[in-house]
């Protein structure tokens, strides 16, 4: 338990660092960065999330169930429908939700909204607990030596050099990877997807 508390405390430091990097990216990018509430084109289709992301999402579900049971029920219902659509197609363990091959996730769900997304508002019901991928997608980011990634809706008309000048390196010290390793050593399953994280309780193997 003490180890888990330490990991979750370190995760808060990780998220604070990512928030600071996002603020710097926004400062550098100015009007080129168009991400805003209700812009949800990046909230479609399944993708891999880490055990750390899954733990954070489950904590968020615990909070939402206490603060707004009705909304939590809607999120769970969307997650259940999402998993039903994945039946017999999930490239992983259907019981634990552990994902074995992200590339094998079915294309049929590419246009299906994340179950955490409120279809009425276009906003995330678990925004404060969202995965790291969701936090870092949009601004220009360093993804490899001399390579950068950014949302295709941002930086319209910007040159490659201009985009590179806006780019930030998220989690440059590799804290996320160390925390994921620590969770694995504590018995938590490996990568999964958001829908499974919202369905299952927060615990290591053998407690799900």
Image: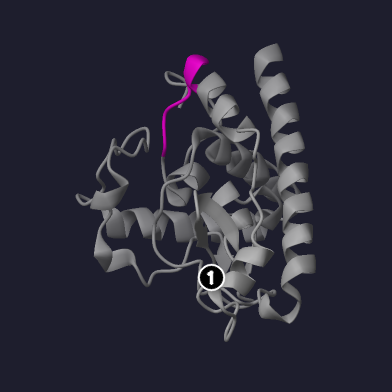
Q: Which region of the structure is painted magenta?
A: 184-191
Residue at x-position 68% and y-position 65%: 166
Which quadrant holds the N terminus? Answer: top right
Can residue 1 be seen here? The reply is: no
Does any portion of residue 5 appear in the rendered image? yes
Examine the image and state in which quarter residue 33 appears. Answer: bottom right
Q: Would you call the spot at circle 1 few (<14 residues within 10 Å), some (14-19), or many (20 or more)? A: some
Local secondary structure at mark 1: loop
Front-most of residues 76 and 122? 122
Q: Position of residue 196 (x, y in %)?
A: 43, 44
Q: Which residue is at the front of the view, 86 or 66?
A: 86
Question: Is residue 111 in the magenta section?
Answer: no
Location of mark 1 (residue): 151
Where's residue 163, x and y in %?
60, 70
Query: Where, quadrant-wise, is the C terminus in this rendering?
Result: top left
Q: Main secondary structure of the magenta part?
A: loop
Residue at point 59% right, 57% down? 141
The answer to whether 200 appears left or right of 25 in the picture is: left
Q: Is residue 185 magenta?
A: yes
Residue 8 vs 106, above or below: the answer is: above
User: Horizontal placement of 117 versus 111: left or right?
Assistant: right
Q: Position of residue 158 (x, y in %)?
A: 59, 81
Please tell me which residue lies in front, 73 or 149. Answer: 149
Residue 156 sits in quarter = bottom right
**Position of 96 compared to 158: left or right?**
left
Give the image quarter of residue 22.
bottom right
Of residues 133 and 205, the one nearer the viewer is 133
Vertical relation: 90 (above or below) 182: below
Q: Is residue 121 above or below residue 97?
A: below
Q: Is residue 82 left or right of residue 115?
A: left
């Amino acid at each position: 338990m003490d180890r888990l508390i330490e990991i979750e405390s370190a995760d808060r430091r990780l998220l604070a660092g990512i928030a600071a990097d996002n603020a710097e990216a926004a400062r550098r990018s100015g009007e080129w960065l168009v991400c805003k509430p209700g812009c949800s084109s990046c909230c479609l289709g399944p993708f891999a999330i880490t055990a750390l992301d899954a733990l954070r999402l489950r904590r968020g579900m615990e909070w939402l169930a206490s603060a707004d049971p009705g909304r939590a029920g809607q999120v769970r219902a969307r997650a259940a429908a999402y998993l039903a659509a994945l039946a017999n197609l999930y490239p992983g363990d259907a019981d634990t939700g552990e994902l074995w091959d992200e590339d094998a996730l079915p294309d049929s769900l590419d246009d299906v909204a994340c179950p955490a997304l409120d279809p009425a508002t276009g906003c995330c019901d678990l925004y404060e607990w969202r995965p790291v991928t969701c936090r870092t997608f949009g601004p220009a980011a360093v993804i490899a030596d001399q390579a950068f990634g950014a949302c295709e809706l941002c930086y319209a008309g910007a040159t490659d050099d201009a985009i590179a000048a806006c780019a930030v390196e998220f989690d440059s010290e590799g804290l996320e990877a160390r925390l994921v390793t620590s969770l694995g050593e504590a018995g938590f399953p490996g990568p999964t997807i958001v829908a499974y994280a919202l369905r299952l309780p927060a615990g290591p193997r053998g407690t799900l």
